[in-house]
Amino acid sequence: MGKLLTEFLGTFFLVLTIALSVTHAGAMAPLAIGVVLIAMVYMGGHVSGAHYNPAVSLGAFLTRNMPGRNLVPYMIAQVVGGVAAGAVALVLTGEHPAPAPTTADNMAALLNEILFTFALVLVVLNVACTPSTRGNSYYGVAIGLTVMAGAFAGGSISGGAYNPAVGVGLCAIDAIRGGSSLSHVWLYLAGPFVGAILAAGAFAIQSRPAKAA
């Protein structure tokens, strides 16, 4: 129960920060998002692994860094946290920004979500799930800075979710209010999950023992 509560709370504060900062922090929104993720990773890493993202959980499962029995409960806790954060953001501000591609080319938006989720999951696997780096003090910073970089670099292309809990959580609240964001929620499911699968494959290659010369 403690692990699921941690995943809910970490995802909640991540998505809440996204929803509030996109509206009120302007160009500096990625900075707030990266910083809160760093803090939440250090808050919950020792409890649940601090995934806060169904794509990260999928990558951990595929690389045998998480038991299969935890995968669906983690994803549910994360998505519920995202939806709850979207609802709270609406109550606090009366506004509810949902991620949306800012390009007419959906394939460009999809590719952006794949690439930066790939980068995120690969970083998580290497800094938090590898025996040679396990227990290091920098893993939270590496993870948060990866998300920050992705938000700065690709946010103007796809909305920069890189996380199905962000996409589903914020788009669901937008849809309840009569918005049309559910029409592109598939980008925030397909892109991150494909990115996670590719990252798991890359990590498996990285982790192979080197052949003796």
Image (spheres, rainbow, N blue to C red):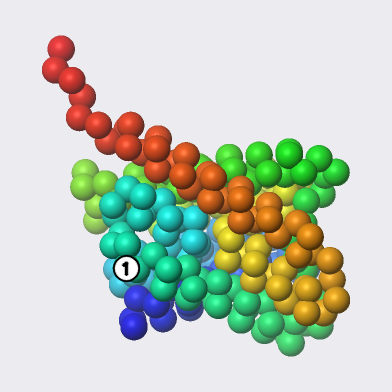
Return the x and y of residue 31 as percentages of the image width and height: 62, 57
Residue 178 higher or lower than 51, as above or below: below
**Residue in the foreground of this view, choosing between 96 and 109:** 109
Report the side of 25 relative to 146 (left or right): right
The N terminus sits in image quarter? bottom left
Q: Is residue 147 visible?
A: yes
Q: Position of residue 52 (x, y in %)?
A: 48, 66
For the point 82% across and 49% down, which residue is it?
102
Is residue 45 visible to the viewer in this orientation of the structure?
no
The furthest residue to the top: 213
Q: Quadrant of residue 49?
A: bottom left
- Tell whether 98 sits left or right of 2: right
Which percent across, then down, holds residue 180? Answer: 84, 66
Q: How many marks?
A: 1
- The residue under the point 42% across, 59% down is 57
Can you say whether 118 is above or below 160 in the image? above
Q: Pointer 1: residues within 10 angstroms few (<14), some, or many (20+)?
A: few
The residue that disc 1 covers is 69
